[in-house]
Amino acid sequence: MKQTLWTLAALLSHWRRRPGNLATLVAGLAVATALWSGVQALNAQARMSYDAATAAISGGGARTLVAARGGLFDQDLFVKLRRAGVDVSPVLEGAARIGDKTIRIIGVEPVSLPRASPIAHKRKRADVLEDFFSGEGRGFAAPQTMRRLGLAEGAQPQTERGRRLPPLAALAEAPPGAIVVDIGVAQRLLDRPGALSRLVIADDAAPDDERVKRVAGEALRLVAADDESELARLTDSFHLNLTAFGFLAFLVGLFIVHAAYGLAFEQRLPTLRTLRALGVAPPNLVVAMACEVAVLTLVAGGAGVIGGYAIAQALLPDVAKSLESLYGAQISESLSLDLRWFLSGLVMAGAGAVLAAASGFAKALRLPPLSVARPIAWRAEHHRYLRRQAALAFLALVAAACAYGSGEGLASGFAMIGCSLLAAALFLPVALAGALALGERLARRPLARWFFADGRQEISGLSLALMALLIALAANIGVGGMVEGFRQTFTRWLDARLAAEIYFEAATPADARDIEAWMRMQKDISAILPVWRAKTRIGEGPVEIVGMTPHETYAAHFPLLEAAPDVWTALHAEDAVLVSEQLARRRGVGLGAVIGIPTSTQVWRARIVGIFPDYGNPKGQLRIDHERLKRYFDDASGVHYGLRIASDATARVIDNMQRRFDGKIARIIDQSELKGLSTDVFERTFAVTTALSTLTLVVSGVALFASLLTLSDMRQARIAPVWALGATRRKLAGLELMRVMAFAAVAAICATPLGLFMTWCLVAIVNVAAFGWRLPFHVFPSQWLVVFLIALCAAFLAALVPVARLARAAPTDLLKVFSNER
Amino acid sequence: MSIHATPEHLEATWKAAPMLRVEGLCKSYSTPQGAIPVLRGVGFTLAAGASLALTGESGSGKSTLLHLVGALDDADAGEIFLDDARLTLLSEHARAAVRREKIGVVFQQFNLIPSLTVTENLGFQARLAGRYDSAWQDELTHRLGLTELSGRYPEELSGGQQQRVAIGRALAVRPKLLLADEPTGNLDEASGDKVMTLALDLVAATGCGFLMATHSERLAARLQRRVRLESGLLAPQ
Ligand SMILES: Nc1ncnc2c1ncn2[C@@H]1O[C@H](COP(=O)(O)OP(=O)(O)OP(=O)(O)O)[C@@H](O)[C@H]1O
Ligand SMILES: [Mg+2]
């Protein structure tokens, strides 16, 4: 025990002399932990919000009944079930807009709500109960939601359909982004008289499927309590993406820790030897080192988790907005995290630290007490090192190939990217050594030869930082290429898809009929294109059905990936559908296949005559003939329209419509504004990805800086002899700078094909698995140039301090190299 | 020196004039505990072809003096004239040139550049100074018995072999002054003696001045003159 303590004291004294190195080590681990736990915090926050949305009503543990094909069902079913003795509580959910914000309206029946529901608790308070039933009732929203809407207690905002909400009250238990009202009020607000979206089954009463089936027939479907919410499933890939990038950043951070710890180990080798010579047994040495790592984990991990909180806080608004606009999910915008998250951050930090220190432990166990009289056989060591790197790189490559062979899933896609990044990183030192050997062979002047020969000695010290740089650069090229490619494809697609000049939504179907009648008489309006919508479910997922009228606009503009030759005539004349790319992939169907679509009354079988891209839509989509939509889906929206307008009359038409039908139009928007909104959604979605890949680059720059700083001590021993032989410090410093920049340049050159490969993986495997669409593969050489310059700048900045230190090193410092103390 | 002097006269004067002259040299190291005075006015001369042993207790400042003479460090006060150049007045750049062209150094350890082979190490300074002479290099290699070892790297050599390479490298440039700091400190007696003999032979062959710091009375006795460093001053023996 005592021995360990003294050993630990001796080990720790190292850091007192080198606070800079300690700072790097702590910072590296902290940054890695911060990036990882920040991303985890975002994911946890989102998942919690999804759960809260369901839990607020059902108490989390309850099972629910929903319409078998999705959408709404008649409240008669509820009445029948109640009469049959099944203890259920009705819920109606729907979206409404207040001002420019979308909110969820949740209608509940407080008396029959399960007791576990946080909202139900409130019913014990007489005033709440009274509120619900007195007159127009009350609306409950979380304080945060009220703040977001800019509403005060008691306010009565209007929805876009012109319906006035009951006076609002703050209730902390209300789910984020939602207003809870009485079921009757909700039916009025959402314009859904007599409709329900689900039935919550009361706590202990577990109705057997038989009884439900007898009463409701095939109309209802039982959803188990532990089934994740629909939202959680839809957003899964989004979160997996975040996790993957968080992990990438963590890996890059680990490279810093590994590098910093490894260098510290080398520097402490004499101390360790002396300790061994003084009689410290190897296990004691390792125990002491482990204690040191534990302290490091607590300090750096703790700081990292706090940093992660800050990162999550900073990224949350973007993540929340993209989740909202992509999936309609409402995320609470104030982070609330639990102990489990904190601990998992620490565990990750600890695992990283142990991983980074493992080779040090192994070496310490085998450390001989007597120092080898001759200098370490550097050359033999170096060749062993290069062979090991090459072998490991090969293994990683094999792993990547296995991942590719193992299927098309998201996990295998990421595994493949991870393994190939690792393979390239491991191979980098070999490539550098090769380049330097070549340089040495070509160089004539003595300093130039020394420049190359000596560079090889620097490789192993810098390799980890350079690997981190390579990975970060490749990730930047890879992600940048994917995002840029997506941006171009998306913009082009949007231009074609949004062909109509005006889109509007009537408040009710009746209003829509009025407006339509008026529109037919306007000569500015050259075509009225109803785009009514309905919902159904095919297999596991929700599917949106959109109607299309026969019009040359579609034939001319509507983008299709694959189409039967007679696609547009077939669509309207036969039992035919257009299927979105995601849905086609998910169902594994192609052109010409027949697909069964559950309608209000039956399963309609239709032939696929076209497949269209539908970027950014997490749900599957079907496009069918407008008349068939009306016939098969009696709950079709009946309020959505696109209008073709004679050139430059757009503003006038919008103006006219707004003046004439003020209350009857829920929303009207012109094409350019809609494009702006969609592009905005796109930008938000990738803001986080881009932020993470940039952070990764910063982290790798720090790694390079840290390694150079730590190495600069050792470099002096290499440089001093050359200086003593008559080379000026300035010249030597210049060579050092050049060498680091040359290394970075090689890393950047290697990163380019690697980044391209990563783009390909993202586009052809990950995106397809995550979102269901495949983008065309684009190449952006200008991006490569930027990344190359970034690499040079990063190397320059990282090397500046150590090199300046060298250039201004006092002769005494350099002479110490020759003094006997070394 | 008269203006009527013949060139031969001049040459004689030049030969007789000391190649190295050190006057009133002072040096102290500053530490957190205060300045440590190491040299307090050291002066001596060394003619071309002459050899001088510098002895003294450990910590007496032998290495410090050698570093100053070798244009590796700055003195606090005093002058060093090497072959007419006044070292104390030179810029960093010019001092580097002096080190390259006029001085050969052999240290106790950390002498060789580990990334270069024996041959490359041998020729390194001469090439750096732009006066590489392959015949001379071959002769050195031969006389130092390094022919067999020429393709090896320093880590593959014994201590004595390494020191032989270091001496060869220092002399390859045909320096005016050879400085050695405990050149045999890391070697056993026999190989130390062998290295010493080689060094003295080659010094005689090149005609350079030779200044060596050592602990060993036995080694010191092999040089022409010896001085002892004591409390920062030279005491002739
Ligand atoms: N960089 C330094 N900072 C502070 N003091 C130093 C430094 N270098 C040397 N000294 C001190 O200067 C004195 C002379 O050192 P020097 O190395 O010249 O002695 P030396 O005669 O060569 O000793 P040795 O025979 O042991 O090699 C010593 O007391 C030493 O502690
Ligand atoms: Mg000494």
Image: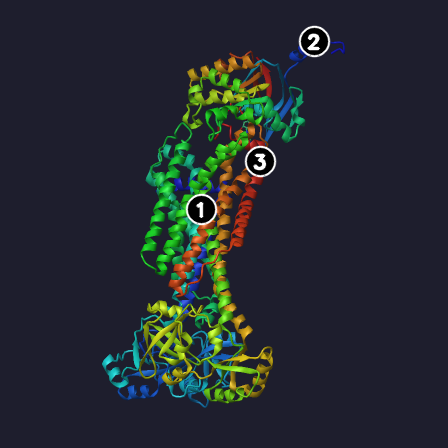
Mark 2: is the Cβ under 8 angstroms from ligand 1? no
Return the residue at label 2.
B9
Q: Which residue type does callout 2 highlight? A: His
Q: Secondary structure at mark 2?
A: helix
- Return the residue found at the far front: A565
Element type where label 1 sits in the image:
helix
Residue depicted at x 40% and y 59%: A764
Mark 2 and mark 3 in contact? Answer it, CB < 8 Å.
Answer: no
Q: Residues within 10 Å of mark 2 (few under 14, many from 20)?
A: few
Q: Amino acid at mark 1?
A: Met
Q: Tell me residue A816's x, y (percent).
A: 53, 31
Q: Is mark 1 within 8 Å of ligand 1?
A: no
Which residue carries the number 3 mark?
Answer: A809
Depth check, mark 1 against mark 3: the one in front is 1
The Cα–Cα distance between marks 2 and 3, rounded to whole angstroms, is 46 Å
| 1 and 3 marks on the same chain | yes
Can marks 2 and 3 be said to lie on one chain? Answer: no
Please determine whether, in this image, residue A446 is positioned above or below residue A765. Answer: above
User: What chain does mark 3 sit on?
Assistant: A
Q: Is residue B91 above or below residue A85?
A: above
State which tag comes first along the sequence, 1 or 3.
Answer: 1
Q: Residue at x 39, y 35 (%)?
A: A383
Tell me residue A341's x, y (percent): 40, 61
The reply to whether discs 1 and 2 touch (Cβ–Cβ < 8 Å) is no
Q: Position of residue A653 (x, y in %)?
A: 58, 82
Q: Is residue A310 visible?
A: no
The residue to which callout 1 is attached is A467
Amino acid of disc 3: Ala
